[in-house]
Amino acid sequence: YSVTLTHILHYHIHILHYHNHILYYHIHILHYHIHILHYHIHILHYHIHILYYHIHILHYHIHILYYHIHILHYHIHILYYHIHILHYHIHILYYHIHILHYHRHILYYHIHILHYHIHILYCHIHILHYHIHILHYHIHILHYHRHILYYHRHILYYHIHILHYHIHILYYHIHILHYHRHILYYHIHILHYHIHILHYHIHILHYHRHILYYHRHILYYHIHILHYHRHVPSLCHLVLSLSPRFMDNLQTEVLEIEFLTYSKGMTTISEEDFARILLRYTNVENISSYLDNVRQSIPDEKGITFDEFRSFFQFLNNLEDFAIAMQMYNFASRSIGQDEFGRAVYVATGLKLTRHLVHTIFKIFDVDHDDQLSYKEFIGIMKDRLHRGGRGYKTAERFTSFKSCMKKELAGR
């Protein structure tokens, strides 16, 4: 390690000679630019944490596809290895900054050795390029899973390019400090883009949730066939016991992401946002009239908690059982009140909805303001919402629309 430090010191002595001509004009603003450089390094840390977040998302979806888990774990470890390499280079940059402070007093004696260190920096850049190419190689290995991880591969490619770009930004800041203001504006655009990426991930999670529902039904079908022929009864019982719990945990995490998107760090979401979530994937043409109805009917917002939010979507998973109870009222040409609605939900699904949640549901779907809920007003709309996963959302069209949206956003900036 001491030999490595000696080599690093020699390399910096070489670069300090070349910087003599530049530092004649910039010595008085060096501290100011060093603070800016610290700020951009913190920005880079922030983007690295964002990359960690997306890596955890990718790791989460790999656990969903349990039959590929061994291959994907291997590549995730490779990706962590390269992230640790990037952390190492960041610590090297911090060390360079402290060395620059120390050698400011002897800059006038080391001008002729700068060219050697430039070649060494180029060598480090080539090494970084080599590691990026290794990352690209492992991404191409994941091409086998493209039908399921298609969107995540594009996101991963984008973050690799972002890391590559930030490395060049750091190199650029060392040589030309006048352009920091323009680079700061660029990072603001990057931050806006990551917000769009977050919303895009939420849509992807919804899409995968419906794919998993479809595969769960197929799995149940095959398990019942195997159980009937008594080939693997023990395996059937095991999968039948684990699958509902797995799907319940998956739905809870997806719902938590959607809830946090609207709660903005609070423990509740507004009744209007709750209505907007319910009506977002339906065939209701005039959604604004439903939202106006909620605002007028519930002037004092109490908010919907996550437990209420989750219990309602658990109720939607058993909507068919509740629809049978609603049909009884429909055949009798009767509407259903709030108390009857709560009892029918409990009898059909075993779930107890809070009075505030039931009241909010009535204010959303009671279009004729008679404080009663008909089969058409509620069941028809909710059944349409449950089929939102198969509504012709093609993969290629999603990505094309996403790129068009991004181009418009950047052009507007």
Image (cartoon, rainbow, N blue to C red):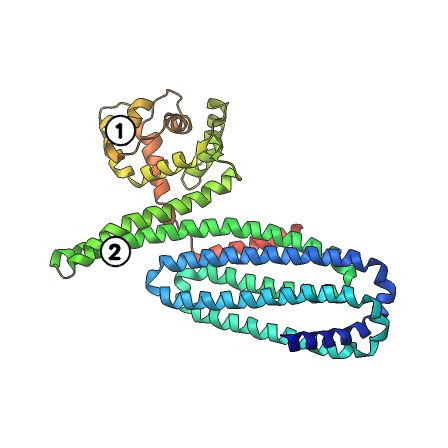
Q: What residue type is labelled 1?
A: Ala
- Viewer-side residue, 192 vs 263: 263
> Is 240 on the left-hand or right-hand side of 230?
right
Q: Is mark 2 on a helix, strand or loop?
A: helix
Counting from the top left corner in percent of width and height, residue 335 is at 29, 23
Q: Residue furthest top?
A: 370
Residue identified by numbered label 1: 344
Q: Which amino acid does label 2 sit on?
A: Leu
> Is 322 on the left-hand or right-hand side of 190?
left
- The answer to whether residue 286 is seen in the rendering is no
Counting from the top left corner in percent of width and height, residue 174 is at 74, 65
> Is 70 on the left-hand or right-hand side of 320?
right
Task: Name the residue located 65 percent from the left edge and 67 percent from the top edge.
Answer: 92
Which quarter of the figure is the N terminus placed in? bottom right
Res 403 label? none
Q: Residue furthest front?
A: 2
Can you say whether 216 is above or below 364 in the image?
below
- The answer to whether residue 378 is seen in the rendering is yes
